[in-house]
């Protein structure tokens, strides 16, 4: 609730409003807070109908009902098919969102499905709604989706509708949410991204703060380690630099040049410590 209040205070003004798409999605998302249904059943007839489906939406909805009643996990694919069927039909926004949420209710680990819903929701990129989406994404699928959130923040997504002045607010809100949840993988990625941006903007103090946050969260990003340890060595902080470098080298950089540079700097740090 504190994060939500912070978002509303920071983003909303008396002249802003919640887009209709965001209102609908915020109403639907609590379904994903419910326990996952038991999907151990099997309905061969409904599956066959789904595989051969070429007819009306009404028939598809009947197939979905049959699969759901049987507890057949294929129901997720059927709901996904419904979402893609109505997505580009005029006036079907709410039906599209409901179908995507239903599909995720049955298959919450599907990163591609989350990506499609996020892509659709980005048409009306209301930041509290995007944070609520992030909140409900399983942690292990978030790394596949954070790049798209960053693209939305920069207006580089398919729609490009987010006010550029609010891009930082979105990234900050996601980072705060990840930190509050103890989602270290997301913290590492988001803080590393903010460190890169801060350095490019000439704010080295903020860059160092973000780099430290990223590495303490377990980042093995070679670019983060490289830039951060250059600063640490300049400050004579060889112990921390060595720790950051060892951590980064547990996932050796693809570039042999970068790997050799980090290894050489680590050797220098270790020599200074002996």
Image (spheres, grey):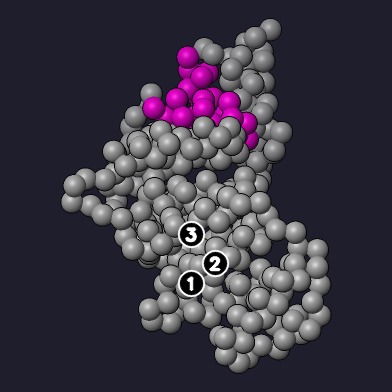
User: Which residue sits at x=66%, y=68%?
Assistant: 76
Q: Which of marks 3 and 1 precedes in the sequence?
A: 3
Is the Cβ of the residue at disc 3 closer than 8 Å to that at disc 2? no
Check if mark 2's residue and mark 1's residue have beta carbons within 8 Å: yes
What is the residue that sits farthest to the front in this orientation? 69
For the record, the magenta segment spans: 206-235
State the separation of the CA atoms marked 1 and 3: 11 Å
Residue designated by label 1: 96
The image's mark for residue 7 is: none
Q: Is residue 251 above or below residue 28?
A: above
Expressed as whole percent of the image width and height from the top left, the position of residue 182 reads 58, 32
| Mark linked to residue 28 | 3
**Residue 268: image location, x then y, percent:** 63, 18
Q: Point out the image quarter for the C terminus.
A: top right
Is 86 left or right of 182, judged from the image as shown? left
Q: Nearer the viewer, mark 1 or mark 3?
A: 3
> Rounded to the nearest whole Å, what is the CA distance between mark 2 and mark 1?
6 Å
Q: Residues within 10 Å of mark 1 (few under 14, many from 20)?
A: many
| Residue 192 visible to an observer of this rendering | no
Which residue carries the number 2 mark? Answer: 100
Q: Residues within 10 Å of mark 3 (few under 14, many from 20)?
A: some
Which percent across, then down, holds residue 1?
Answer: 43, 36
Which secondary structure dominates the residues rendered in magenta?
A: helix
Q: Is residue 262 left or right of residue 167?
A: right
Queried whether the magenta region covers residue 89, the answer comes back as: no
Q: Secondary structure at mark 3?
A: helix
């Amino acid at each position: 609730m504190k994060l939500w209040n912070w978002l509303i205070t920071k983003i909303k003004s008396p002249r802003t409003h919640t887009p209709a798409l965001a209102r609908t999605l915020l109403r639907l998302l609590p379904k994903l807070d419910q326990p996952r249904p038991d999907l151990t059943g099997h309905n061969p007839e409904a599956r066959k109908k789904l595989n051969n489906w070429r007819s009306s939406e009404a028939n598809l909805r009947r197939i979905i009902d049959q699969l759901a009643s049987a507890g057949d996990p294929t129901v997720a694919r059927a709901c996904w098919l419904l979402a893609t069927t109505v997505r580009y039909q005029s006036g079907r926004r709410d039906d599209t969102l409901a179908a995507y949420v239903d599909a995720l209710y049955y298959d919450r680990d599907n990163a591609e499905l989350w990506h499609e819903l996020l892509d659709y929701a980005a048409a009306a990129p209301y930041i509290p709604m995007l944070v609520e989406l992030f909140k409900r994404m399983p942690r292990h699928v978030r790394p596949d989706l954070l790049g798209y959130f960053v693209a939305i923040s920069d207006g580089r997504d398919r729609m490009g509708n987010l006010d550029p002045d609010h891009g930082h607010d979105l990234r900050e809100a996601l980072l705060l949410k990840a930190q509050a949840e103890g989602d270290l993988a997301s913290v590492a990625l988001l803080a590393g991204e903010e460190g890169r941006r801060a350095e490019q903007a000439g704010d080295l103090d903020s860059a160092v703060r973000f780099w430290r946050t990223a590495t303490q969260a377990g980042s093995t990003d070679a670019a983060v380690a490289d830039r951060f340890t250059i600063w640490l060595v300049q400050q004579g902080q060889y112990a921390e630099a060595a720790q950051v470098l060892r951590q980064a080298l547990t996932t050796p950089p693809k570039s042999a040049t970068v790997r050799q540079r980090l290894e050489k700097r680590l050797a220098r740090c270790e020599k200074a410590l002996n």
